[in-house]
Image: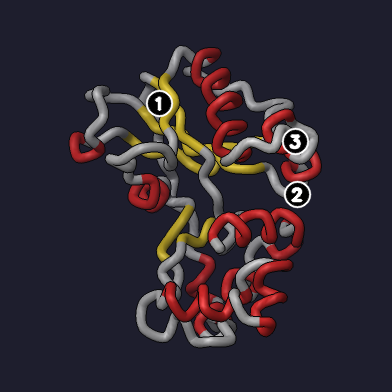
Amino acid sequence: MSDLILAGTGLIEMGHCTIMPSDGLTHAHGTLVLLGPDEPAFWPMFIQTLEYNDGAPDPMDRWSRRTIDVVADQAKGVAYYPFGDAPFLPFYTWALRTGRAWASPIGFLVHERSGLFASYRGAVWIPENRQTAPAILPCMSCDAPCKTACPVGAFTQGYDVAACKSHLNAPQGASCLSDGCKARRACPVGADLRLSAQAAFHMEAFH
């Protein structure tokens, strides 16, 4: 089996799924292994990288591509990314198929380890077929505080992006910018893994 060499990369496996024809990939068989940050160790490592410190745009995407390309080459696989030019790859669907992430009550992915701060930096195709053993959806035993945590009710009906960004532009949105989305922060899963500095980085990119 093609084991991915992730030691020292700051990444972990976030789940895997079998290739399907609807994925639109060139491979007819095999497995996609989804990769994400190894929290909370990832952020202190990432801010030491060349990409973070060189002042050029999209540092995390560039770091992800550089790092995961090496992981894929070592495994004799192929790397895929959730960013770049259209057409965009169905990472949301792939994440659901891993059995390790689900659609949360507010629609965002909730991962068994990372909660609502799930982040997929890329995926590596390997030729072997790995078995998937679904985990238990954490939302089944949760009171869903994520649904009511947003100060402007941006998740009352779907996701009101305009209301969210308007709040971020106001003084009242300072906490969301500095510490991360309050709805995501309300998720109890992975609460001990979250660093405010990393959440602020992503919020600034979204903003």
Label 1 – label 3 distance at C-alpha: 30 Å
Q: Which residue is mark 3?
A: 53
| Residue type marked 3 | Asn
Q: Which residue is mark 2?
A: 40
In the rendered image, the vertical position of residue 201 relative to residue 155, given as above or below: above
- Number of callouts in the render? 3
Q: Residue at x 44, y 26 (%)?
A: 79
Crowd band around label 3 with a 10 angstrom C-alpha radius: few (<14), some (14–19), many (20+): few
In this view of the protein, which residue sits in the foreground, 77 or 54?
54
**Label 1: which secondary element:** strand
Q: Residue at x 57, y 18 (%)?
A: 70
In the rendered image, the vertical position of residue 143 relative to residue 161, given as above or below: below
Q: Residue at x 67, y 68 (%)?
A: 177
* Residue 59, quarter of the rendered image: top right
Label 1 – label 2 distance at C-alpha: 26 Å
Which mark, residue 33?
none
**Disc nearer the start of the sequence (1/2):** 2
Q: Is residue 50 left or right of residue 26?
A: right
Residue depth check, mark 2 versus mark 3: number of the one nearer the observer = 3
Q: Position of residue 130 (x, y in %)?
A: 41, 30
Q: Which residue is mark 1?
A: 125
In the rendered image, the vertical position of residue 29 relative to residue 111, given as above or below: above
| Residue type marked 1 | Trp
| Residue type marked 2 | Pro
**Label 3: which secondary element:** helix
Q: Is residue 125 left or right of residue 58?
A: left
Q: On the rendered image, what quadrant is the C terminus found in?
A: bottom right
Question: Do the CB atoms of the residues marked 1 and 3 lie less than 8 Å apart?
Answer: no
Question: Do the CB atoms of the residues marked 2 and 3 lie less than 8 Å apart?
Answer: no
Question: Do the CB atoms of the residues marked 1 and 2 lie less than 8 Å apart?
Answer: no
